[in-house]
Amino acid sequence: MLIKDEIREKIFEVAESTGIKLTEELKAKITITYPQSQFGDYATNAALILAKEARLKPFDLALELSSKLGAPEFEKVEAVAPGFINFTFKNGCLTEKLKEKPDAVSHSGKILVE
């Protein structure tokens, strides 16, 4: 499973644990992107998409979700206005992920970095 997919699944788990009913339509609208480096390694719009269903302001939902999305591989998970969540990996974590997943190397010998 790709790192983006792992983050997406964790977001779904945390959102559902807070009582948000996730439809396939909502899940399809949630994106995991690569922001500018000063914002972290990955970012998601999940709180912006799910705020209406949660009956919260996007930033308030981002704060709630980010507090529950922490994992050992992340240096920080941060809510930012208007409701994005940024993920920053600890130093060396991506290298370790590649070691764990040798299938991340393509047939040409290039390393696939999501």
Image (cartoon, rainbow, N blue to C red):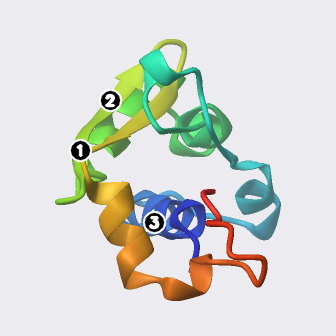
Q: Which of marks 1 and 2 precedes in the sequence?
A: 2
Residue at screen point 67% across, 39% down: 49
Q: CA distance from mark 1 to mark 3?
A: 30 Å
Amino acid, disc 1: Asn
Dot 2, crowdedness within 10 Å: few (<14), some or many (≥20)? Answer: many
**On the rendered structure, is 40 left or right of 109?**
left
Q: Nearer the viewer, residue 43 or 94?
A: 94
Check the picture and name the quadrant holding the N terminus. Answer: bottom right
Q: CA distance from mark 2 to mark 3?
A: 19 Å
Name the residue tied to disc 2.
Answer: 78
Q: Position of residue 31 (x, y in %)?
A: 70, 47
Name the residue tied to disc 1.
Answer: 91
Disc number placed over residue 16 in the picture, else none: 3
Q: Position of residue 10 (x, y in %)?
A: 43, 66
The secondary structure type at the circle numbered 3 is helix
Dot 1, crowdedness within 10 Å: few (<14), some or many (≥20)? Answer: few
